[in-house]
Image (spheres, helix red, strand yellow):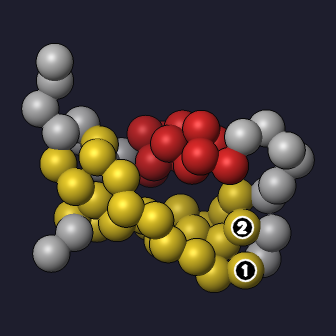
Amino acid sequence: MAQTTKYVIKYKLNGERRFEFAQLEKGTPDEAEAALKALHGQSGDVISDISVSKAL
């Protein structure tokens, strides 16, 4: 199993500012986007303005 770190993902969902916590390996925007798509499903929601930083 790969080493993960807790990150906070800040993003917009259909224009509404939101954030989530996630255990990610590298904390890249692509990895964060994949985690958000898994969380929100393929319901046609628009995910944008993704930023990732280590959680305190």
Which element type, helix, strand or loop, lies under badge 2?
A: strand
Identify the image quadrant of residue 31. top left
Q: Which numbered disc covers residue 16?
A: 1
Residue that mark 2 sits on:
13
Identify the image quadrant of residue 42. top right
Which element type, helix, strand or loop, lies under badge 1?
A: strand
Q: Position of residue 48 (x, y in %)?
A: 67, 63
Q: Residue furthest bottom?
A: 17
Residue 52 in view in this figure:
no
Camera-nearest residue between 52 and 6? 6
Query: Contact (CB < 8 A) between labels 1 and 2?
Result: yes
Identify the image quadrant of residue 15. bottom right
Q: Is residue 7 above or below residue 37?
A: below
Residue at 22 percent across and 69 percent down: it is 55
Q: Position of residue 1 (x, y in %)?
A: 16, 18
Question: For mark 1, does the 10 Å Cα neighbourhood hold few (<14), some (14 to 19), or many (20 or more) residues?
Answer: few
Label 1, label 2: how many angstroms apart (C-alpha)?
A: 5 Å
